[in-house]
Amino acid sequence: MKGSRIRRALASLALALVVALALVGTALAHDVTFDTDLSLHRSPGGTVASGTQITFSGALSSSKAACERNSRIDLIKVGSGVVERTRTGAQGGYSFQRKVYQTQNWRTRFRGKVLSAVHPHNHVCGASVSRTIQVPVG
């Protein structure tokens, strides 16, 4: 009788241990995607003459600082595709300089990046696209 109680107690303890380990393992495995937002501005503003150099600038922002630092940003001439690439600074800022010769729409894109992909963890910065801005040439 005493031996069967001990065996039942040990079996219950073993089962509890297996359940606890399964729950801890599940809690440790996770996927996290940090949202990002990409701003875009230009200088000078208004209508410009053909051949004017425009500075396109903005910032990549996120709740995760690692998403903002050293991230690749594409400058896109709408209808033509990527015309230049750069990397963000420590605070997420970026800029491009381009001469414009005709009225054109522009935007920037961050394709996202992987921060940690060691199984069973997956931490990534989500992709984002800026608003489209037009540079009128006249």
Image (cartoon, rainbow, N blue to C red):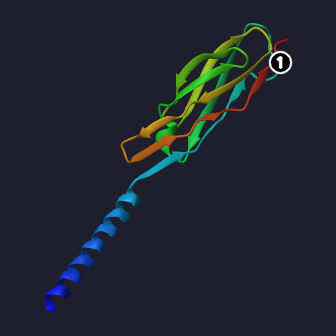
**Residue located at (54% from left, 48% from top):** 63
Mark 1: give few (<14), some (14-19) or many (20+) Cα within 10 Å.
few
Q: Is residue 78 above or below residue 24?
A: above
> Which residue is depicted at the point 52% across and 45% down?
33
Q: Taking 98 as reference, is 110 above or below it?
A: below
Would residue 131 be found to the left or right of residue 18 on screen?
Answer: right
The picture places residue 126, in percent across and down from the top left corner, at 56, 39
Give the quadrant of residue 99.
Answer: top right
Task: Kindly give the residue lying farthest to the bottom in the view shown.
Answer: 1
Quarter of the rendering occupied by the C terminus: top right
User: Among all residues in the image, which is located at the extreme right?
Assistant: 138
Q: Amino acid at mark 1?
A: Thr
Q: Quadrant of the N terminus?
A: bottom left
Q: Residue 87, how many percent across, how many down? A: 51, 26
Viewer-proximal residue among 71 and 58: 71
**Residue drawn 29% across and 67% down?**
18
Q: Given the current orientation, which residue lies at the most extreme left position? A: 3
Drawn side of residue 117 relative to residue 81, left or right: left
Q: Which residue is mark 1?
A: 47
